[in-house]
Structures are given as structure tokens and as C-alpha cells.
Image (spheres, rainbow, N blue to C red):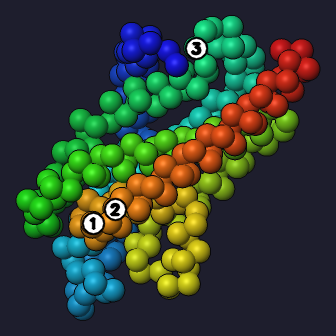
């Protein structure tokens, strides 16, 4: 693991790069406004009464924090890996004492630091306009932040693992779209997972998708409490461990493939 000084230097570098491309960052944030659009739709539906235990206030809280979760956990590392393999950009990273994962991760963290000053006020204003602010939200904030950090790790590791396909195929980028659609449909971005049929919820409970978006959001708005929160954290850690082991195994094989190709 690299030193804190090295990580801080990488983060500062990538934060500076992100500041130079603020327009691009804004476009990416606009692309992540699906939760806000869905909030307006569900608020209209909730005018006739609560739906599955969600009233207008709960829907507003859920989708505003879903917007925050979506903006805090995106990853484009499959694109970085695909470009690195095809253009040889990965080779200089391999010659350094720091694992390339840290370079990719710091690029995402730098972008996140640029987004937060814009995202947080949007959420705060949204809660105020929707009259959905509650002091109880502050009590759930530490668990939400912890869940969001582990959610990012799951999402990043999933994409890193799938990105290994780039070492063998020219179509790795196509899988990025597939993963994105799965997270949108199964992660609670369009419909809260609690409103899915119970049979579907039982199946999703064994997948990582709800634990990247829906789980930390429901923790934040008080829909998951007590032991269930700890159980959710345990499942997040399980997926981090499984995906991390899978990536480590695949990375060794990928490097042998990369070397055999003459890189």
C-alpha cells in the first residue's frame, strides 16, 4: 500500500485536473439526474396516498439522497483500463512502485471533490423545497457516509474486475453500459427496492446492486435501522472481499496476457 503522502499527492494532482475540466464534470452530473426526474414522478403518484409505506416526504428524501449516492459513486475505470491496454498507457503505471489501482482510484476521488460543492447544495435546497428536512437525518449521517464509502468500493471493484476483459477483448467498453443499466434498474434509481415484489427483493439481496445505492440511501432516511444496518454493512464487506479476491486473481492472469502481447 502506498504512503499517505503519495496518495495525497495523487489526489491533489487529479483534483487539479478535474478543476480544469469543470464543464465536463457538469455534463456528467447532468447525466446523473435520473433520480431527480424519478422523484418528480413518484411525488405525483404519492398525491393519492402513500405507496408501500412511502409518502411524498419519504419519496423526496429517498430520491434526493439517491441523487447524492449516484453522484458520489460513479466510476469510469473500465474506460481507463481499456484505453490503458490499447494505447499502452498502462505500461508506465506498471513500472512504478504503486499499484495502478491507486492511480485509477485517485482520479475518481479528485472528480468527487469537484462535485461535492455542487451536489450538496442541490440536495439541501431540494430537501427544503420539498419540506422533507428532518433533524433525524443527522443521526443517520455517519452510517450513511460509511455505507457510501463501502458502496463506492463495491462499484469500483466490480468495474475494475470487468475491466480486465480489456486484456483479452476489444469490446470491454460494452460491458460498462450493461453494468450501468443493471445499477439503474436494480439499484433503486428508478424504483425503491422496497417496492419491488418480495420474490425479486429476495433475489436482489444476493447481488451487490442494492448495496451500492439503495442500502445507504435507506439507512440515511431511516428505512433500515438497528441490526439490519449492521447486517447490510456485513454484506457490503462480503462483496468487497469477494470482488477484491476475484480482481486480484484476474489481475495476475491479465498481466501475463499483457506481457505475452509484447507490452
Residue, disc 1: 226
Q: Residues within 10 Å of mark 1 (few under 14, many from 20)?
A: few
Secondary structure under the numbered disc 1 in the rendered image: loop
- Pinpoint residue 44: horizontal percent, then vertical percent: 27, 80
Observer-nearest of 211 and 44: 211
Q: Is residue 256 left or right of residue 222?
A: right
Q: Is residue 34 left or right of residue 75?
A: left
- Find residue 7 and report its image quarter: top left
Residue, disc 2: 229
Residue, disc 3: 98
State if disc 3 and disc 1 touch (CB < 8 Å): no
Q: Earlier in the sequence, mark 2 or mark 3?
A: 3
Q: Is residue 30 visible?
A: no
Q: Is residue 245 left or right of residue 69?
A: right
- Pinpoint residue 19: horizontal percent, then vertical percent: 36, 22
- Pinpoint residue 241: horizontal percent, then vertical percent: 57, 44
Q: Earlier in the sequence, mark 1 or mark 3?
A: 3
Which residue shows up at 30% across the image and 46% down it? Answer: 145
Which residue shows up at 85% across the image and 24% down it? Answer: 256
Amino acid at each position: 500500500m502506498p504512503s499517505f503522502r503519495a496518495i495525497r499527492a495523487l489526489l491533489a494532482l487529479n483534483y487539479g485536473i478535474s478543476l480544469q475540466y469543470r464543464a465536463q464534470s457538469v455534463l456528467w452530473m447532468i447525466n446523473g439526474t435520473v433520480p431527480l426526474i424519478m422523484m418528480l414522478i413518484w411525488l405525483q403518484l404519492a398525491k393519492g396516498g402513500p405507496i408501500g409505506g412511502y409518502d411524498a416526504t419519504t419519496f423526496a428524501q429517498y430520491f434526493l439522497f439517491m441523487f447524492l449516492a449516484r453522484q458520489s459513486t460513479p466510476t469510469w475505470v473500465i474506460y481507463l483500463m481499456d484505453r490503458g491496454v490499447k494505447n499502452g498507457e498502462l505500461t508506465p503505471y506498471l513500472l512504478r512502485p504503486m499499484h495502478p489501482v491507486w492511480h485509477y482510484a485517485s482520479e475518481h476521488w479528485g472528480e468527487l471533490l469537484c462535485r461535492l460543492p455542487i451536489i450538496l447544495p442541490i440536495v439541501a435546497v431540494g430537501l427544503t423545497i420539498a419540506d422533507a428536512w428532518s433533524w433525524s437525518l443527522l443521526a443517520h449521517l455517519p452510517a450513511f457516509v460509511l455505507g457510501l464509502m463501502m458502496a463506492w468500493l463495491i462499484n469500483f471493484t466490480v468495474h475494475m474486475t470487468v475491466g480486465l476483459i480489456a486484456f483479452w477483448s476489444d469490446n470491454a467498453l460494452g460491458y460498462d453500459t450493461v453494468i450501468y443499466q443493471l445499477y439503474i434498474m436494480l439499484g433503486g434509481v428508478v424504483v425503491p427496492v422496497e417496492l419491488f415484489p418480495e420474490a425479486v427483493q429476495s433475489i436482489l439481496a444476493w447481488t451487490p446492486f442494492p448495496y451500492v445505492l439503495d442500502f445507504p440511501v435507506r439507512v440515511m432516511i431511516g428505512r433500515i435501522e438497528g441490526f439490519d444496518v449492521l447486517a447490510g454493512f456485513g454484506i457490503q464487506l462480503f462483496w468487497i472481499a469477494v470482488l477484491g479476491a476475484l480482481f486480484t486473481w484476474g489481475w495476475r492472469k491479465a498481466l501475463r496476457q499483457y506481457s505475452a502481447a509484447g507490452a
